[in-house]
Image (cartoon, rainbow, N blue to C red):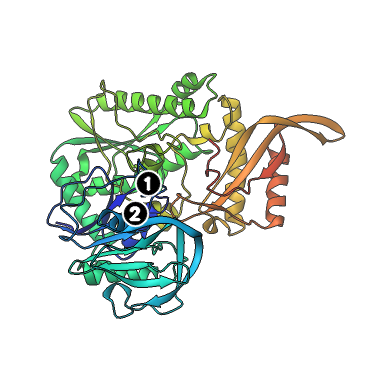
Amino acid sequence: MQEKILILDFGSQYTQLIARRVRELNIYCEIHPYNKLPELTDNLKGVILSGSPYSVREENAPIPYLNDIKGKLPLLGICYGAQYLAQKYGGEVLPSKIREYGRANLSFVDDIHPLLKGFSIGSQVWMSHGDTIASLPEGYKIIASTHDVECAGYHIDNETTYGIQFHPEVYHSTDGIILLKNFLVDICGCSQDWTSVSFVEKTVAALKDKLGNDKVVLGLSGGVDSTVTAVLLNKAIGSNLHCVFVDNGLLRKDEFTGVLKQYEGMGLNVKGVDAKQRFYDALAGVSDPENKRKVIGKVFIDVFDDESNKIKDVIWLAQGTIYPDVIESISATGGPSATIKSHHNVGGLPEYMKLKIVEPLNTLFKDEVRRVGKALGLSQDLLGRHPFPGPGLAIRILGDITPEKVAILQDVDHIFIMRLKDYGLYDDVWQAGAMLLPIQSVGVMGDERTYEKVVSLRAVESVDGMTADWVHLPYDFLAKVSNDIINKVKGVNRVVYDISSKPPATIEWE
């Protein structure tokens, strides 16, 4: 059984980053809400308590049940987790006289302590808290301090329990990865054997066991996520996998034929379905972003229901859902955090559809999916393809959807993507696309007044889609693209470039 680390989530914005850093050390981990502990199995090697937007002093502060964990398994409390472990067992947490946010430096380090091996005085750490541990319970020993925070780290005597006030998961904590390795490898005893190759082996074996001789229908999109899902399933069940690629009328230009050609020779059983009109009819007059997503999701389900009914004895619907989809669609903590936007492939199936869901990638981030794809032998052209939203161009057309608007945006997007490739910029960008805005602007062409549509170009750099920054594309490139779009796409007379980061914006506009 795969060894694992459990991360208990108290709602911190950094919780997913903790998971990423753990996985960078080739150690498998799972995030669970603090109030919904999974079964504590023998393969559990240790537990990490995340930070939180709450204060431990608040009346409604999250309270975990740790009776089966503390003193029995290695336990690391980070920020809120450290404060909770101090206050719960007899210490005192008070508002900080000086709020400490951002960079700080350790003024004291117990460098012989197993948790801080490799640290030195002056090591930069990242703080993000308004409370401080004023006093520790009996048996708690300070192992690190900053100039302003005496208890930046502690160890409980006779336990493998630790608390740290800073965030080792944040890259600004320069030795943070050392601390995590000390905890995970030296203290928890993790073997660091969770690699892309091992993920493939274990996932294929698990799929074989789960699916047996059952038939599975999978919706392909041409992107990395669904393709990796297809190859994993094909390895597990072979001809019992039935892939369906739906033309929803919201794909990139010529993508339907291009994707079908892409899958030739991969040994996959793929069927193309033209459902453009079904989507256009359902989307007619729908402008609200969430409603558009829900409509698209419903029609996708309906199409797959129709196609699955054509396959005798199909039992499962496979989806290329990845972890950011899940995080953005539902609260990561199962609590009151906001749903950013719903995803068509998250949230289950309607009762009338008698299929069970299988999602082999729903615990992976995008970059992890690419590494798995590489381990599966997929081509770099496919692995390097920019992410494309499941609802397609519908969420890049602000307002209602018409075939005419789709055609305009397809042409704009095609020029943008082709020029990125021509200039050797495509691989420097994590995701790029164009948005059709619900406004018109005055222009002049051939001494005549025009009143036509505005498009916004968007290009971002990211690792996993959870955060993103806009790409500083060269001015000469943007000038060339703008000129090409306005000259070649009838109905557009103005091009702008989106320089918003995520957060506060999202990558897509809807």
Q: Quarter of the image holding residue 14?
A: bottom left
CB within 8 Å, label 2 to label 1: yes
Question: Which three-letter amino acid code belongs to the residue tagged 2?
Answer: Ser
* Residue sitting at x 40%, y 47%: 54
Residue nearest the observer in this picture, 295 or 67 = 67
Residue 101 at least partly seen: yes
Question: Which three-letter amino acid code belongs to the residue tagged 1?
Answer: Gly
The relative height of residue 232 versus residue 106 in the rendered view (above or below) is above
Q: Measuring from the top left, give residue 39's x and y in whole percent.
A: 16, 47
The relative height of residue 69 versus residue 155 in the rendered view (above or below) is above
Instruction: Check disc 1 and report the residue beneath it.
Output: 11
Q: Which mark is residue 69?
A: none
Q: Which mark is residue 50?
A: 2
Q: CA distance from mark 2 to mark 1?
A: 8 Å
- Judge from the rendering whether residue 205 lies leftward or rightward of residue 492; answer left or right: left
Residue nearest the observer in this picture, 495 or 365 = 365
Residue nearest the observer in this picture, 14 or 386 = 14
Q: Measuring from the top left, give residue 183's x and y in whole percent.
A: 27, 68
* Residue sitting at x 21%, y 63%: 74
**Earlier-in-chain disc, 2 versus 1:** 1
Q: Measuring from the top left, give residue 168's x and y in whole percent.
A: 39, 64
Look at the numbered disc 1 and give the secondary structure of its residue. Answer: loop
Residue at the limit of the structure toward the right, as seen here: 447
* Residue sitting at x 63%, y 49%: 499
Look at the numbered disc 2 and give the secondary structure of its residue. Answer: loop
- Judge from the rendering whether residue 510 lies leftward or rightward of residue 235; answer left or right: right
Q: Measuring from the top left, give residue 48's x and y in whole percent.
A: 28, 57
Q: Quarter of the image holding residue 141?
A: bottom left
Residue nearest the observer in this picture, 88 or 353 = 88
Quadrant housing the N terminus: bottom left
Q: Quarter of the image holding residue 398?
A: top right
Q: How dense is the environment of label 2, judged by Cα within 10 Å: few (below 14), some, or many (20 and up)? A: many
